[in-house]
Image (cartoon, rainbow, N blue to C red):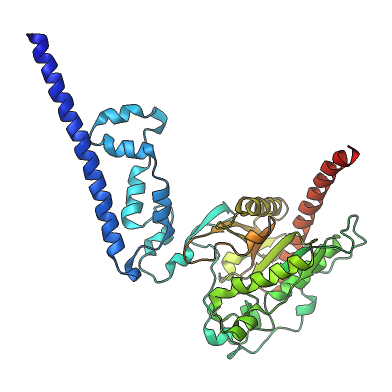
Amino acid sequence: MKPLKTTGMIVVVQGTSLLKIIGGFLLFLLLIFSISGVLTSLKPEYRISSSSVNSAANNITGEMLYHFLGWENHHFMQGLSEQNSSLPLTSMIFKLSTNVNLDDPRSLLGRELPLFSLYDSKILVAGEGTDYTNMPVESAPPLEVLRAEQEATLQNTEDLDIAGEKKPSGAPSNTTGDRNVVYVYFTHNRESYLPYLKGVTNPNLAYHSQINVMKIGDKLKEELESKGIGTEVDKTDIQGNLNKKGWLYPKSYLESREVVQAAAANDRNLTYFIDIHRDAGRKEKTTKEINGKPYAKLAFVIGADNPNYEKNLRFANELHKKLETKYKGLSRGIIQSKGAGTNGKFNQDLSDNAILIEFGGVDNTFEELNRSAEALADVFSEYYWQAEEVNQSVKEPVEKK
């Protein structure tokens, strides 16, 4: 009779374990539905808007569910390999319940400051000194400034046309001939620099219709063409067009998109598209001394909400690596931007070779900016001619066949 009793006990124990498993699973589902109900019932202004929750939810896997159930029944833990037995559940649950990412201090303020979702960017490649406390930031200009109703008086403009070092150069060894292959444009074309705006100290007011980021395009074109790379600089007044249409600042990329599309349709030789901006950061974050001379630091921004994301990232990463080799510390790295509160595309879905570059910050001078334009042209030309050499070597065997 002993075996029968033992068998009966085993059945009872197994039945109890099964009930615990089912009960634990139902409790887990109830908890999830309860949290979801609370979140969706909140007023829009109090709802979690940061992408950190979406990111955490997207990372929930079957292994994690096993861990949840394992708290009720340890037999589930045995189904996991030792190497995966310690998953960051605590961090994930903390992120889900509080919207705070322990690896990103910005998220501590994510629900306290309005529009803080604008800072939901990710560092893909960190340059020297780059972290989540000093990432590139777009300032929020007042409407009257954008409409040029209260433009500052200009100052320190005497040497703007000769800023930067002019270097003697002979004819380039390679050339694109009469073809323009690089297209430079400016979505936020009136972003300016405080040293040239008399009486202005507020970064949010560093805008001007005459002296602005578009001057960087002139130097970049000069340097690229000295290296044989045909370049077109488009100085369309995007902000002026917005004003005429009665559009607000967030529609800047929609307006510049039309300009880029028209240029690409008119000239099929255009292959590389560079959107130049200015960061709102201050000088200590946006300036680097190299060989005793100050440069305006560069930051690459890639929109992840577009099908060309991987290719554009690869392009930006090649330029970053070359800058690190030849101009150590000049690049602030590569920042990914996507999701609610940002454009997420930056027109980069229009080309495999499209990037956005932040040139310096509000305190930089054109002497510093022009040095950085020279450095960018230097590494870009190296990248371009290497790529052309590879393309040519691929074409030759095909042509012989």
Vertical position of residue 335 compared to residue 18: above or below: below
- Picture residue at 39% right of the left edge, 44% below the top: 60
In the picture as drawn, the residue positioned furthest to the right comes out as: 171
Q: Quadrant of the N terminus?
A: top left
Q: Position of residue 221 (x, y in %)?
A: 79, 68
Q: Position of residue 331 (x, y in %)?
A: 64, 58
In the picture as drawn, the residue positioned furthest to the left comes out as: 1
Vertical position of residue 80 compared to residue 267: above or below: above
Q: Is residue 298 visible?
A: no
Residue 151 placement: quadrant: bottom right
Residue 301 placement: quadrant: bottom right
Residue 87 shown left or right of residue 154 in the figure: left
- Picture residue at 18% right of the left edge, 29% below the top: 17
Name the one closer to the observer, 52 or 196.
52
Name the one closer to the observer, 248 or 387.
248
Name the one closer to the observer, 242 or 235.
242
Q: Quadrant of the C terminus?
A: top right
Q: Position of residue 209 (x, y in %)?
A: 66, 84
- Picture residue at 53% right of the left edge, 55% below the top: 123
Residue 113 shown left or right of residue 29 in the figure: right
Residue 76 placement: quadrant: top left
Q: Is residue 43 visible?
A: yes
Q: Position of residue 43 (x, y in %)?
A: 30, 69
Vertical position of residue 386 compared to residue 351: above or below: above
